[in-house]
Image: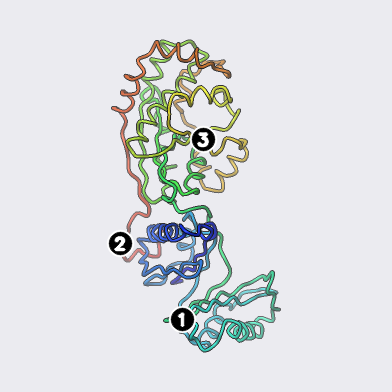
């Protein structure tokens, strides 16, 4: 195929800001296919038309476009001449081998100077398709749809709609910092915030050398996968084992997990401010583990002043795992690892921490020094998608 007809929904409701969101969506679409030889992207009424310089394998186009947030659905289309006979010939060729009991023709005539109006185009093409296929016309619930676009310089046709991921274009809603582990929850949380138009910077806390590097490797793979949706990502790796060791040496067992989480948030907030991010994101789900009771979450979030977004807070574990399967993170998250939250974890952690008790325990620590240690020893890594390939490999990239 050489073109894609892209439709958006939520963006169309933005009224005064629609142009801003549409331009951002266009930039993101072009970023997603920058190695495939895109020719141009045109704005039509509530739609976009992406054209390529050469034929691209349909499965490659589908994989790329279906990862771009802001797209409601899309159709693979082919460019042809602005001639009803040529349109008829190519459409009939295109439906060869297709089986359907009902169909409709959906024509948008962007060029009002074309000899036929939309109804006449639908009637002529519909008669030809009906004669060839034997299928009946159904304008309300067809099994098969032929889309036709007639523009001033060319025409396009395609079949049926493919689902997009919906949401808003990444970048339209600002920047966030996501605390990401190798588990199921935090990658899903990051995905959901990307879907709402946020660009996400990732922060991972690890306990090397006290534990192996499995969690770090998993997080790299997760960020690599999620970068398909925002095209550029940064991942901060923060060593947390020594910070945990000092907390263990100074603090009674029940409150250790709460103090771990408060220290993580302080470090993540510092990184967020340096990245000009406006909020933190976590994968917390109310009541799922000891640190995620309402009492503990309240005490933990008081360690920072930046807003903390919890897109999974009302979801149960099965709902989160089901979404992990849908977005492709499940297999990576399923690999066993040694997460830093498993290091020095008390047998019976507190589920109803009180702020005064936590504050008293933190006076036994040099909080600023520990935060500084985490920041000074953190490393950062860059990820990008797509990875550019040689020109003769275009069409084979995924």
Q: CA distance from mark 1 to mark 3?
A: 48 Å
Residue 106, percent from left and from top: 59, 75
Residue 19, percent from left and from top: 43, 61
Specify whether residue 143 is in view: yes
Residue 109, percent from left and from top: 52, 79
**Label 1 secondary element:** strand
Q: Which numbered circle lies on residue 283?
A: 3
Q: Which sits in the foreground, 19 or 263?
A: 19
- The image shows residue 196, relative to residue 336, as above or below, that is below
Does label 3 or label 2 sit earlier along the sequence? Answer: 3
Q: CA distance from mark 2 to mark 1?
A: 29 Å
Colouring used for the render: rainbow
- The image shows residue 20, relative to residue 314, as above or below, that is below
Q: Residue furthest front?
A: 16
Q: Which of the two discs, 3 and 2, sits closer to the camera?
A: 3
Q: Is residue 76 left or right of residue 202?
A: right
At label 1, counting other C-alpha atoms closer than 10 Å, the crowd grade (few under 14, some 14-19, many 20 or more) is: some
Residue under numbered circle 2: 390
Residue under numbered circle 1: 80
Specify whether residue 225 is in view: no
Does label 2 or label 1 sit earlier along the sequence? Answer: 1
**Label 3 secondary element:** loop
Q: Which of the two discs, 2 and 1, sits closer to the camera?
A: 1
Q: Which sits in the foreground, 167 or 329?
A: 167
Q: Which sits in the foreground, 52 or 335?
A: 52
Q: What residue is at 41 percent from the left and 48 percent from the top?
A: 227
- The image shows residue 50, relative to residue 92, as above or below, that is above
């Amino acid at each position: 195929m050489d073109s894609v007809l892209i439709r958006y929904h939520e963006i169309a409701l933005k009224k005064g800001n629609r142009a801003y969101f549409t331009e951002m969506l266009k930039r993101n679409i072009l970023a997603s296919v920058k190695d495939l030889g895109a020719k141009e992207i045109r704005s039509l009424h509530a739609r976009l038309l992406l054209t390529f310089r050469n034929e691209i394998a349909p499965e490659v186009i589908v994989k790329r476009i279906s990862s771009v947030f802001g797209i409601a659905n899309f159709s693979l289309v082919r460019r042809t001449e602005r001639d009803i006979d040529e349109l008829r010939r190519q459409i009939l060729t295109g439906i060869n081998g297709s089986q359907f009991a009902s169909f409709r023709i959906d024509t948008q005539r962007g060029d009002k100077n074309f000899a036929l109006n939309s109804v006449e185009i639908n009637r002529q093409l519909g008669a030809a398709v009906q004669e060839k296929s034997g299928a009946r016309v159904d304008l309300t619930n067809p099994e098969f749809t032929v889309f036709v676009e007639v523009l001033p310089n060319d025409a396009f046709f395609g079949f049926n709609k493919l689902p997009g991921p919906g949401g808003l274009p990444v970048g339209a809603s600002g920047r966030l910092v996501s605390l990401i582990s190798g588990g199921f929850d935090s990658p899903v949380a990051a995905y959901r915030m990307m879907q709402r138009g946020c660009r996400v910077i990732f922060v991972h806390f690890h306990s090397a050398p006290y534990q192996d590097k499995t969690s770090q490797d998993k997080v790299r793979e997760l960020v690599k996968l999620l970068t398909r949706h925002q095209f550029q990502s940064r991942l901060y790796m923060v060593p947390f084992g020594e910070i945990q060791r000092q907390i263990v040496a100074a603090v009674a067992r029940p409150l250790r997990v709460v103090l771990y989480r408060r220290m993580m948030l302080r470090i993540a907030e510092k990184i967020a401010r340096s990245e000009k991010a406006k909020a933190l994101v976590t994968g917390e789900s109310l009541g799922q583990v000891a640190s995620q009771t309402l009492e503990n979450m309240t005490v933990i979030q008081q360690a920072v002043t930046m807003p903390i977004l919890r897109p999974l807070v009302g979801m149960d574990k099965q709902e989160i795992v089901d979404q992990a399967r849908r977005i492709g993170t499940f297999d990576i998250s399923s690999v066993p690892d040694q997460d830093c939250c498993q290091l020095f974890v008390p047998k019976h952690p507190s589920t109803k921490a009180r702020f005064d008790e936590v504050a008293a325990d933190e006076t036994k620590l040099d909080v600023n020094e520990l935060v500084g240690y985490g920041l000074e020893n953190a490393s950062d890594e860059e990820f990008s998608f797509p990875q550019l390939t040689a020109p003769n490999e275009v069409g084979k990239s995924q």
